[in-house]
């Protein structure tokens, strides 16, 4: 096998091996994160109620 054909063969084999990895990486769903700053104490009952309502509101949203 000539050096040029060997190079083409190695390139082809390498591409076949790497392509499924690249394609799989592009199909992943993005993880979405939301940060919240609340100026209430962690043991404040009203703050806990507000935070729970906030979380329930996001669960009701259809973000897909």
Image (cartoon, grey):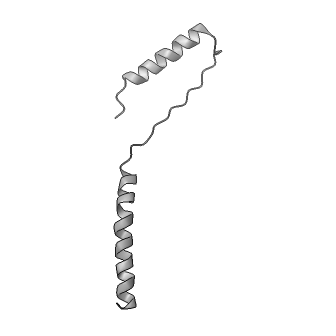
Where residue 42 sits in the image (x, y, percent)?
Answer: 63, 16
Residue drawn at x 35%, y 73% is 13
In this rendered view, identify the residue nearer to me: 3 or 49: 3
Residue farthest toward the front in the current orientation of the protein: 1
Residue drawn at x 47%, y 15% is 53
Quadrant of the rendered image containing residue 6: bottom left
Quadrant of the rendered image containing residue 30: top left
Task: Indicate the quadrant containing the N terminus: top left, top right, bottom left or bottom right.
Answer: bottom left
Task: Indicate the quadrant containing the C terminus: top left, top right, bottom left or bottom right.
Answer: top left
In this rendered view, identify the residue nearer to me: 41 or 28: 28
Position of 28 relative to 20 (above/below)? above
Residue farthest toward the right in the current orientation of the protein: 41
Residue drawn at x 36%, y 63% is 19
Left or right side of 51 for 58: left
In this rendered view, identify the residue nearer to me: 12 or 51: 12
How many numbered tags mark residues here?
0
Residue farthest toward the top in the current orientation of the protein: 45
Where residue 10 sits in the image (x, y, percent)?
Answer: 38, 78
Where residue 11 sits in the image (x, y, percent)?
Answer: 38, 76
Position of 51 relative to 4 (above/below)? above
Residue drawn at x 49%, y 15% is 52
Position of 58 relative to 53 (above/below)? below
Position of 24 relative to 18 (above/below)? above
């Amino acid at each position: 096998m000539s050096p040029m054909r060997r190079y083409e063969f190695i390139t082809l084999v390498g591409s076949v091996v790497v392509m499924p990895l690249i394609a799989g990486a592009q199909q992943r769903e993005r993880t979405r994160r939301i940060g919240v700053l609340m100026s209430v104490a962690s043991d404040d009952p009203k703050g806990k109620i507000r935070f729970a309502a906030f979380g329930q509101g996001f669960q009701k949203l259809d973000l897909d």
